[in-house]
Structures are given as C-alpha cells and as structure tokens.
Image (spheres, rainbow, N blue to C red):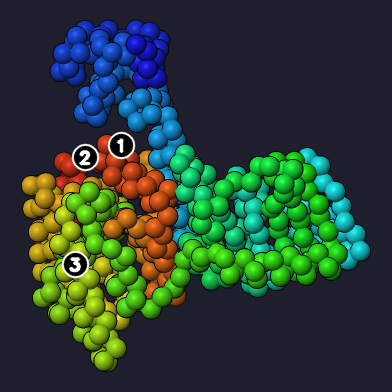
Amino acid sequence: MSTVLSEALRKVIAEHSVVVAHLAKDTSIDRTTLQHIIGGRRSPNKSQIDKILYHIPIPEHKKKMVFQAFEITTRGADRYQQQEKVKTVIEKIAFASAMKPSFTAPNVNGAATPNAEESEELHGILAINNALINIINQEEESVSFFMPSHFPIFYDTLFVKYMTSQTLAVTCFFPMSNEEGGIIHDLEYCESFIPFFASPKHSFRAYYMREQSSLHDTSIIPFPYFVHTSKHVLLLSADMKHAILTGQETFVRIYGKKCREFLNVASPLFLSPPLGDMIMFFPNKSSSKDVFAALENQPCFQYYLTEQIIKKYAVPTSKEQAELVEKYTKYIHDMIQEPDLFSAFGQEGLDYFVETGYIAVWPPSLGKPLDVPDRIELLERMLHDIKNDVFHCRLVDASKFTIPRPTVTIAIRRKTLFVQVLDYKGGNVKNICLSEKNIVDAFSDFLANLPDTNLIHSKKETVRAFETALERLKVL
C-alpha cells in the first residue's frame, strides 16, 4: 500500500543511497517496522518520524518535505490543508498586530474612472484588478464591500490603503456558511479580514451573515458581489470574470442604502466591550470533551494566578476598579477549574516576564508587575506541573511558526474562539468571540493537535526554557 509518506521516503532513500539497515540501527526502530513504514503498510508515530528525520542523511529542505508528507498521510489531505489555513490566519494576525500606520498623501492620480454619467464593462481578471486598484487608491472616505474570499489583489490593496490613509473607513460583509465541507471557505474569509482587525487602527468594521452559502448560480444573481466607495460602485459576477464599474450617482446611492440594510441582518464580527463584560463572557459550561487551549506570546500565567497574588498586585483605587478585580478573581477561579489546558507560548513572552514582571494580558489598571520572588514562585509552580504532565505547556519553534506579539491572545474555551488584541498602552483593544461551528472546529483541531506537529518544541526543550528563566531570575 502506497502513501504520500511512503512515496516521499522511498524517493529520498533512493536519491541519497540510504541503507535501511543502518537507518534502523541509528533510530532504534525495528528493521521490519521501518520497512513497513517505508512500504506504506504502517504509519509511524511522531516520535518515530522525528528519529527518522534526525538520522537520515538528507538535506534539510527534503526533511521538511518528508515531514509534510507525514502530516498529510496521518491527518488526510483535507485536514492538513485546513490546519495550514489556520496557521496562515494566525501568522497574519501576528503580522498585522505588529504593524504601524504609515500615513501618506492622498493619491489624486491614476487611471481614469467613470464619471457621474458613465459606466464601464470589465472583462477578465486583469481589467477587474486594475479597476479595483484604481478606485481604492483614489478613495479617502469609505469602502464597503461584499466580495469573494479568494481575491488577494483586492484585500491586499485595500489593506495597504487602509494602513496609509488617515481618513479611510472600511466595512466588510461576508457570509459564514457553516456548511459541512465548508471549513476552508469560511477560513478563507477569516484570512481576508483578520489583518484589518488585528491592526492598530480602529476604522474597520466586519459583519457576517449566518448560514449563507457561496454564490455560483449566475442565472439567478449575475452580479452578487460589490465594492462601494463614496464615488463608485463595482459589481462583480459570481464567476469573477466580469464586472461593471459605474460612477452613476443613483447606483452609488442605492448601494449605500444596501450596505445600511445589511447591518440589520448581519452580526458584528468583533466588539470592544468594557473589560468587565469581556471577562464575564462565556456562553456555556465546559464539557470534559471541550478543547481548552491558548496560544499567546507568554505562557498562560493567568492559569496559575492565586487569589493572594491578585490581592497583592491588583490594588483598586475606585469602586469600579474594585468590582473589576472581583470579576477578574472569579474569572481566574472558574478558569483553573477547567482541566487539560494546553498553552503554547513564545520565548519572547517568557523573557519579557522575567525582565519586567508584567503579565501582558493584564490591563495596567488591574495589575502591577510581579516582584522577583513572586515571579520565581509562579514559574517554579508551572515548571513542576510541566515536568509532571499536569500542565500541558510547550514552547513554540519561532523558526517554523510566527505567533502574535505579547498583547494578542488566541484561545478556544467552551466552544468559542477568542481572538483578543489587548494593547492597552496603545489603545488597541478589540475582541472576537466567535461560536460559528466551522471556525471553532478548525481552530480547536489546530490547537488540540499542535503538540503532534513540528511547530513547537518538545517537553524537554520547554522545561529547559523555564529552567533558564529561573536561573536568570535568581541572580537578579
């Protein structure tokens, strides 16, 4: 039986004259077992493929190719594609959250666009792309749109314009199908709009329509997609091969009204609620089968906060702050009652805590930095539980996976996806709380299976990172 992995292994073994007997000896894998793996009659586990890749004498880029084949074989091609798409979404959050707006002078040049009395038919992707680039680059007021997810020229051009304009406001409408087999489609929409959300700007709004399917029947709705600016409307066909661009005032006004009507049937993707409301938002009780996982730049310190630490470092100066501390204490108490948290973190976040004592997700009004003895005590408790497999915490391999900056948290809890940008100092506080099944399932699957990928370091390496952090703290 041939598999993607067995074909990849046989290829590199033949190309590099690898002796299977020697490889079996080096890896301590039974020779018959290794031959069955190479022949496709048996799938290796993560430990076995790691040993094979460590000892097999082939270039690094070919080891990456073999590991990719291993992931496709063990997970299936569709699931592998889904997890790669989630990884892309997370890395786009990381990229956008680190960006700074760079304002430029408005672009008053460019190709001619239809005036108030003209319309233009566009045929072919090149003509459509050029028209989109032109009307976006000339716009300084507003862009509202309902567009396909897989239209990178449009989204990339609009994002650059958004980040370089002081005045442009962007409103996005998109369908959330939740159809079986529609996970990739729904994730593609996340990939398209997530940079706008994660960026430090606040002039972007996103709304989604539940249970909406993709639009492909051009005989029913010949031009279902649109881009609306203050001066133009571009109507795009369902097959994305034809478009109409018009500057007619009536069309611009009609589609402006259409966008306002969409607000009545759509749900906002993200909000910026008061911190107290955000802390208390959890839609249902947890089940033992629910995935509970967090991807942050720091280890999930909140899971190890005690009531004593909160009382020591969260010193309210008003009645409102006292109520907030009370809510936060309850939030921490509820969280630590839920078992099997998996926490993936970055070296940068651990170093930041060692050096400053700041827990990045704490708002400045809620918590002061921990002093050195309390930093040591907190890390020692976490390290003890990591060693004893009580706390499932792993260090991300930064060479293979870019995670967001310290002020961003991505988590799954109680069948809800949370994406939180908590840059209190910079005034960029936004929250996605999404319970749509396709998106939640995709992120849950990604985070739950992260330990079985090569994107994170081993338990041994994670333990070493904590031990090094403690060594540094003990000489401060």
- The residue at 64%/53% (across/down) is 147
**Which of these two is toward me, 257 or 56?**
257
**Is 436 situated left or right of 253 in this image?**
left
Point out which mark residue 187 bears: none
Neighbour class for label 3 at 10 Å: few (<14), some, many (≥20)? few
Whole-number angstrom distance, CA of label 3 to CA of label 2: 29 Å
- The residue at 31%/10% (across/down) is 39
Query: Where does the image place residue 447, in percent across and percent down from the top left?
Result: 31, 47
Which mark is in front, 1 or 2? 1
- The residue at 25%/51% (across/down) is 290
Q: Is residue 63 visible?
A: no
Mark 2: secondary structure: loop
**Is 399 situated left or right of 225 in this image?**
left
Which mark is in front, 3 or 1? 3
Q: Quadrant of residue 373?
A: bottom left
Vertically, is 139 above or below 313? Answer: above
Three-letter code for the amino acid on which mark 2 is drawn: Ser
Three-letter code for the amino acid on which mark 1 is drawn: Thr
Query: Where does the image place residue 346, in percent across and percent down from the top left?
Result: 30, 52
Find disc 3 in the rendering and name its residue.
334
**Is 77 situated left or right of 263 in this image?**
left
Point out which mark residue 458 bears: 2
